[in-house]
Image (spheres, grey):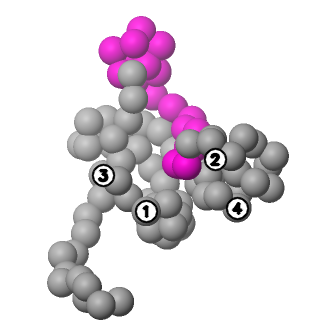
């Protein structure tokens, strides 16, 4: 499980550097990000949501490809996968 604040940092980088979607991690752009909100404890509290509200990341997308949108509506595409990259580094266990 990813720490919600690490998720928040990653979401900011995704929104500023990418914010587009292609089909199955290949081909041309088929959608773009139109909304993003990470539910940190502070956001949950400020919105007056229950304390047990699940932390996570909400995104909303505008699908501008009719064929892809048809697959979403039919249920063939029931979710999305955000592509990313990372660099491994040793963790300082004393930090």
Lateral position of residue 92 relative to residue 32, left or right:
left
Q: Is residue 66 above or below residue 92?
A: above
Seen from the viewer's position, the closer of residues 39 and 16 is 39
* Element class at badge 1: loop
* Element class at badge 2: strand
Return the residue at label 4. Answer: 42
Specify few, some or many for label 4: CA neighbours under 10 Å numbering under 14, 14-19, or 20 or more.
Answer: few
Return the residue at label 1. Answer: 3
- Of pointers 4 and 2, the one earlier in the residue sequence: 2
- Of pointers 3 and 4, the one earlier in the residue sequence: 4
- Of pointers 2 and 3, the one earlier in the residue sequence: 2
Return the residue at label 2. Answer: 35
Q: Report how far apart the C-alphas of labels 2 and 1 lie in the structure.
A: 21 Å
Residue drawn at the location 45% of the way across and 28% of the way down: 65
Residue 57 included in the magenta stretch of the image: yes
Specify few, some or many for label 3: CA neighbours under 10 Å numbering under 14, 14-19, or 20 or more.
Answer: few
Q: Is residue 86 above or below residue 50?
A: below
**Range covered by the magenta-colored residues:** 55-77
- Of pointers 1 and 3, the one earlier in the residue sequence: 1
Front: mark 3 or 4 = 4
Residue drawn at the location 35% of the way across and 53% of the way down: 1
Which mark identifies residue 83?
3
Which mark identifies residue 57?
none
Lateral position of residue 49 relative to residue 38, left or right:
right
The number of numbered badges drawn on the structure is 4
Q: Report how far apart the C-alphas of labels 1 and 3 lie in the structure.
A: 18 Å
* Element class at badge 3: loop
Q: Report how far apart the C-alphas of labels 4 and 1 lie in the structure.
A: 14 Å
């Amino acid at each position: 499980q990813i720490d919600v604040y690490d998720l928040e940092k990653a979401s900011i980088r995704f929104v500023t550097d990418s914010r587009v979607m292609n089909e199955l991690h290949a081909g041309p752009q088929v959608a773009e990000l139109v909304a993003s909100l990470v539910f940190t404890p502070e956001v949950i509290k400020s919105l007056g949501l229950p304390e047990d509200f699940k932390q996570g990341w909400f995104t909303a997308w505008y699908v501008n490809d009719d064929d892809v949108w048809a697959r979403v509506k039919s249920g063939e595409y029931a979710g999305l996968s955000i592509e990313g990259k990372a660099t491994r580094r040793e963790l300082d266990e004393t930090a």
